[in-house]
Amino acid sequence: MSIRDFNWSPEEKKIARTAFDKAYKKEMTEINNELKKRIKNSDDLQKIWSIHDYLSKRRNEIDKKYDYRYSVLITVFATLLTEGYLKEKDLEGLSENKLNAIKFLSQ
Amino acid sequence: MSIRDFNWSPEEKKIARTAFDKAYKKEMTEINNELKKRIKNSDDLQKIWSIHDYLSKRRNEIDKKYDYRYSVLITVFATLLTEGYLKEKDLEGLSENKLNAIKFLSQ
């Protein structure tokens, strides 16, 4: 069975949604903190556009990364695990084959 | 003579550059202040992308507006006068035909 074809039980969908939202919030908070740090130093007016460049880059990454379709969720979670926005315990309760696939892809 | 073909003396070029830079700095400071205000309220994480939208819009406007070619400078100054980023006294020392053209276009 391809990782795109896993069946997700109602309980797993709940766990997945919670984990997904948690990672999103964590990454957005990181962006927000970086923004606050950068604005503190922005009285050099040229830095305003570097803040804009930073936001453009991060928005592009976020839009690509946070794709909540079950057909791609395994690879999304693997990425979030690799990048540290999720921990293995956030995914506890998913079936063994899903967890194995996520861990394998995040290596 | 078309407003695109005015001759600019060295003294006028100096006045023009100073006025142009002053308006640019004033508008960028306004953007910076708005940015600081918005980032203060950005703990609602959804607001981060509205900050990005705001900067995209302003950057686009600034890029279009601040065009320091002598062939378009009369219309640039007229816009800056209309929008309040320049005052008539900032342009004192330019020739009468230039001032008349700028005032006419800024009405």
Image (cartoon, coloured by chain):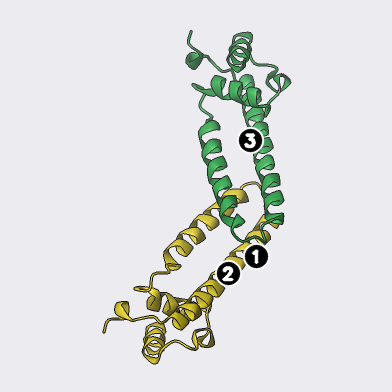
Chain colours: A green, B yellow
Identified at 53% across, 84% down, the residue is B90
Check the image and report above or below for B34 versus A79.
below
Marker disc for residue B33: 1
Q: Do labels 3 and 2 share a chain?
A: no
Residue A45 shown left or right of residue A6 in the figure: right
**Residue type, numbered disc 3:** Tyr
Residue B95, image x and y in percent?
41, 89
Check the image and report above or below for A101 versus B18.
above
Residue A43 shown left or right of residue B51 in the figure: right
For the residue carrying disc 3, how many other residues have a C-alpha within 10 Å: few (<14), some (14-19), or many (20+)?
Answer: some
Whichever of labels 1 and 2 marks the residue nearer the N terminus, that label is 2
In this rendered view, identify the residue nearer to me: B60 or A44.
Answer: A44
**Residue type, numbered disc 1:** Asn
In this rendered view, identify the residue nearer to me: A90 or B72.
Answer: B72
Check the image and report above or below for B22 versus A77.
below
Secondary element under disc 1, as helix, strand or loop, is helix
Q: Mark 3 points at which residue?
A: A24
Mark 1–mark 2 distance (CA, rounded to whole Å): 12 Å
Q: Nearer the viewer, mark 1 or mark 3?
A: 1
Secondary element under disc 3, as helix, strand or loop, is helix
Location of the C terminus of chain B (image quadrant): bottom left
**Residue type, numbered disc 2:** Lys
- The answer to whether mark 1 and mark 3 are in CB contact below 8 A is no
Residue B41, image x and y in percent?
69, 56
Residue B30 shown left or right of residue A4 in the figure: right
Mark 1–mark 3 distance (CA, rounded to whole Å): 28 Å
